[in-house]
Image (cartoon, rainbow, N blue to C red):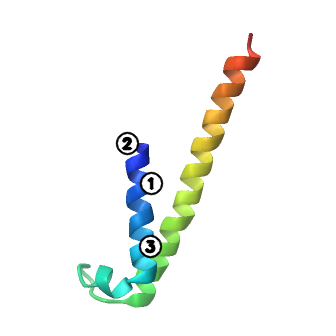
């Protein structure tokens, strides 16, 4: 499930930054290239936070598993 969220958010971020007209044409508030790009950069920031959290959670669980012996 986590991988699906990462893939979906990455695709949305790329489309919103590179092709804001396409993404805006399907939005309820219409085409606003600046707004679409802002959402794309927001998605990138959230992706960095999610991947970092997942990485440190995995490292922490590995550390606990091997160092608690």
Distance Cα–Cα, label 1 vs label 3: 12 Å
| Residue drawn at point x = 74 percent, y = 10 percent | 69
Q: Residue 6 carries which label?
A: 1
| Residue drawn at point x = 53 percent, y = 60 percent | 46
Percent x, y of residue 6: 45, 54
Distance Cα–Cα, label 2 vs label 1: 9 Å
Q: What element carries label 1?
A: helix
Percent x, y of residue 22: 30, 83
Query: Counting other residues with Cα less than 10 Å from the Cα at mark 2, is it few (<14), some (14-19), or many (20 or more)?
Result: few
**Residue assigned mark 3:** 14
Query: Counting other residues with Cα less than 10 Å from the Cα at mark 3, is it few (<14), some (14-19), or many (20 or more)?
Result: some
Percent x, y of residue 60: 68, 31
Horizontal side of residue 47 vs 2, given as left or right: right
Q: In which quarter of the image is residue 59?
A: top right
Q: What element carries label 2?
A: loop
Asked if residue 45 is positioned above or below residue 3 in the image, the reply reads below
């Amino acid at each position: 499930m986590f991988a699906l969220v990462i893939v979906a958010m990455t695709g949305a971020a790329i489309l919103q930054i590179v092709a804001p007209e396409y993404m805006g044409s399907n939005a309820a508030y219409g085409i606003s290239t600046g707004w679409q790009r802002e959402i794309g950069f927001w998605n990138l920031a959230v992706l960095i936070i999610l991947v970092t959290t997942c990485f440190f959670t995995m490292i922490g669980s590995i550390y606990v598993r091997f160092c608690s012996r």
